[in-house]
Image (spheres, grey):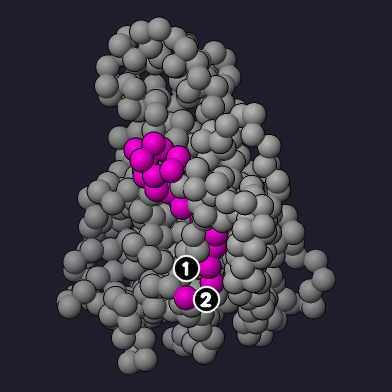
Amino acid sequence: MLFKRSGIYIYADAKKVILKYLNLGVLASSTRIQPLVDRILALDEEQVVQLYQEVEKDFKHRHLNFEYYLETHFEKIQSAIPKDLHLTITRKKLLGAYFSMEYSIRAAALFNPSMVAHPNQSGLEEGEKRFIISLRAVGEGHISSIEFRSGIVTADGEIKLDEDTGFATTAIPDNSKIFHTQKIKKRTSVLSDFDQTILNELGETFTKDNATSKALASSNFISKYDEKTLAILDKIIDSNYDVVTPENSSLTERVVFPSAKQESNGMEDVRLVEFIENEKSTYIGTYTAYDGHRISPQLIITEDFVRFKIRTMYGAAVNDKGFALFPEKINGQFVMIGRQGGVNLTLMYSDDLFIWENYSTLLSPEDAWGLVQIGNCGSPIKTAEGWLLTTHAVGSIRKYVISAILLDLEDPSKIIKKLTIPLISPNQAEREGYVPNVVYSCGSMQHEKLLVVPYAISDSACTFGTVDIEELLRNMEDC
């Protein structure tokens, strides 16, 4: 069985930076924010112009939409400025600059790619397929964000990456997102410790901003509900949001950076799938939200890779990490591969994409090269013979390998075939890195007869490989 490595590598690069709001702390409004604003307001206009010219000279060439982000950050501290005070545009942008910071999104590591067909397949040569990969980028503080690359797989399986411009533009939360009370009630019906009557206080629909104002305006709002209910409502409003990237940016420049408290330390290991229902494609990814103490499985949903919806999953089965959604419903239900407990592959069914209550064990560690734990390497791929699921396994000295199993098309709880050897094992050149002895993927793509596998090497770079699907299936043993 021939697994062909591409020789293409995508490395971590400290030069790719975004402009972030400089958060001086939750309790800093009076002790740090207001005094800093006052010092900037005390500058005369000549000083303001000179200082802003220096800012532009040092930083503008490093960012697209530079003024937009400065103005956005200025708006965050606008409440610290007297309402009757007129400010010039230059002073506003200077204020925004003092409340901005550069963040190198992939200074520490770049790994765990997931691959799907690009929604735009126009303008290609015969036999070519355009793709998108998501990547886990890690920067200062080990915070993970999501970035993207695109490219083409040729008719003979050669991979050609589109140029990376080197710029990065972070997605901005859209605070106009409308919450629908009935949807929240349906999804939270599985939560025994959530008093749903609290939602009646917010009306049939509400936004994040007016939910806060209604709560504050309502006397005894907080005292009427227990701490768990208040905490769950806060988490729902904070963790279900929309973000939009600048439409004039290229895909390689778009970054989805953590916006919610529960993912403040990272959005990890996106597993993208092109989910098709009624001939309509929606790109759905599962990822792990991490706040520095706890993990929470989340969904990221998009149709165009410009606007993204971040959504919560609910239910008893929503725990641990490594969820991967099947690309279509089976017998009218959504189906997901999971790994509750951190050791076994599991299988989950649901009538609702956002509610997952039950799971069953699909496969436990049994091969010598994977006795520690097993998991998926992204969503399964539909073939004529069955659902082809790439898997990862951990063996001695925490060595990660990638293998595969084949599931029944109508009943994916049945394993039809199994590869009894690793498909990919780290070779000598792939062993060294941020996390040694690891090969890992979050999702492959079928192209004609080939399985195209993007994978991370020791959490320090990403590469690609291909294998003939028919040959892979022939090398599997019947179960």
Q: Earlier in the sequence, mark 2 or mark 1?
A: 2
Tag 2 residue: 15
Write down the region rendered in magenta. Answer: 14-35
* Outermost bottom residue: 428
Residue at the location (25% across, 48% down)?
293
The kind of residue on which mark 1 rests is Ser
| Residue 59 image offset from top left, x and y in percent | 60, 68
| Residue 405 image offset from top left, x and y in percent | 39, 66
Mark 2 touches mark 1? (CB < 8 Å)? yes
Q: Which image quadrant for residue 458?
A: bottom left
Tag 1 residue: 104
Q: Which image quadrant for residue 109?
A: bottom left
Q: Does residue 21 belong to the magenta stretch?
A: yes
Mark linked to residue 55:
none
Which secondary structure, mark 2? Answer: loop
In the figure, 459 relative to 76: above or below?
A: below
Instruction: Tell me: 305 left or right of 340.
Output: right
The kind of residue on which mark 2 rests is Lys
Instruction: Tell me: 199 left or right of 421.
Output: right
| Residue 75 image offset from top left, x and y in percent | 59, 41
